[in-house]
Image (cartoon, grey):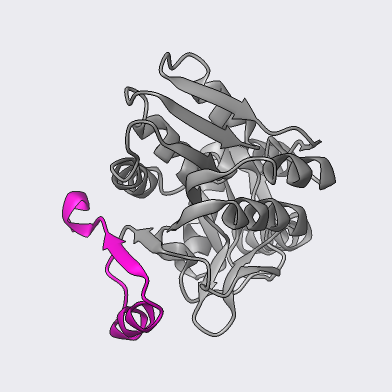
């Protein structure tokens, strides 16, 4: 098979499934994983997909869902910086919600060592990461397990969340757009995030630069319940004015990233 035909086939698979791994493609086409990585690099350069370690996911589409395994290895350095900066906002004695985003997972990692914290999350990865932190009480929200995201969602999860109140919520999304608001690729995850925002004093959006100026499937919020935005790169002047008009604090980690 010619490389151009293989890349067309890869794109069709991505459109059908949303994401795919290098190993799966290597087996399907009978070529080496290095060959597949070169294909994905070429396609990323053409703006057709987002490449990450171990696979790729579709670049566009309102209903773009990426499995946790791929999200967890995408833009890791940026997420670490955002997570560290978010962790600096957490004070000893706080109760916080952490959503199921991989960026919020880095917030959780950064607060290990702080004292007398309560963390509430529907993400199994967050619970696992903080399970042995001696000064953190971990409350895992129950519900219906989504295997692709390793999260608990549904009515049971939402009902559990509204029993609690938190000082801060750290949440992410799939798209951030001035006209269409903060959006997600999955309705059930969006409802969990909405519940967390409704039960929190301070709402902090943690989103890397790839989320900006894009719209996904379902609305989380129109910025009305957002107090702070943390990202890894400077936003445009239009975004700066937007945040000022909404009275939203904006924090960029660009200096830490050395960019």
Foreground pick, 33 / 62 = 62
Is-magenta flag for residue 245? Answer: yes
Name the quadrant containing residue 232: bottom left
Residue at 35%, 23% in the rendered image: 115
Q: Is residue 56 above or below residue 73?
A: below
Q: Is residue 187 magenta?
A: no
Name the residue at 71% across, 36% down: 27
Up the image or down, 196 lies above or below 211; here it is above
Magenta part of the chain: 233-259
Number of marks drawn = 0
Q: Which quadrant of the structure image shows residue 5? A: bottom right
The image shows residue 119 at horizontal and vertical percentages of: 51, 32
Q: Is residue 73 visible?
A: no
Q: Is residue 54 above or below residue 211?
A: above
Quadrant that contains the N terminus: bottom right
In this rendered view, identify the residue nearer to me: 169 or 213.
169
Location of the C terminus (image quadrant): bottom left
Q: Is residue 117 visible?
A: yes
Q: Give the side of residue 190 with respect to residue 215, left or right.
A: right
Residue 225 in the image, given as x and y percentages of width and height: 52, 67
x, y percent for residue 230: 36, 58
Q: Is residue 15 left or right of residue 48?
A: right
The residue under the point 77% across, 44% down is: 159
The residue sitting at 52% across, 58% down in the picture is 50
Between 110 and 235, the residue placed more toward the observer is: 110
């Amino acid at each position: 098979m010619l490389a151009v035909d293989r890349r067309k086939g890869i794109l069709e698979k991505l459109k059908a499934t949303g994401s795919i791994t290098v190993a799966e493609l290597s087996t399907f086409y009978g070529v080496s994983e290095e060959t597949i990585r070169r294909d994905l690099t070429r396609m990323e350069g053409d703006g057709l997909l987002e490449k990450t370690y171990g696979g790729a996911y579709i670049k566009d589409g309102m209903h773009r869902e990426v499995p946790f395994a791929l999200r967890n290895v995408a833009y890791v350095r940026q997420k670490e910086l955002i997570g560290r900066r978010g962790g600096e906002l957490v004070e000893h004695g706080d109760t916080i919600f952490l959503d199921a985003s991989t960026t919020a997972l880095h917030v959780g990692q950064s607060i290990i060592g702080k004292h007398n914290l309560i963390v509430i999350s529907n993400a199994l990865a967050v619970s696992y990461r903080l399970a042995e932190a001696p000064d953190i009480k971990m409350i895992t929200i129950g519900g219906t397990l989504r295997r692709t995201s390793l999260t608990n969602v549904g009515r049971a999860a939402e009902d559990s969340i509204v029993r609690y109140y938190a000082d801060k919520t750290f949440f992410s999304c799939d798209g951030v757009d001035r006209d269409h608001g903060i959006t997600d690729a999955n309705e059930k995850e969006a409802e969990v995030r909405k519940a967390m925002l409704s039960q929190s004093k301070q709402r902090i959006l943690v989103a890397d630069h790839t989320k900006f100026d894009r719209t996904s499937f379902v609305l989380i919020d129109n910025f009305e319940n957002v107090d702070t935005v943390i990202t890894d790169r400077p936003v445009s002047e239009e975004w700066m004015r937007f945040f000022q008009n909404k009275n939203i604090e904006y924090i960029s980690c660009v200096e830490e990233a050395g960019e």
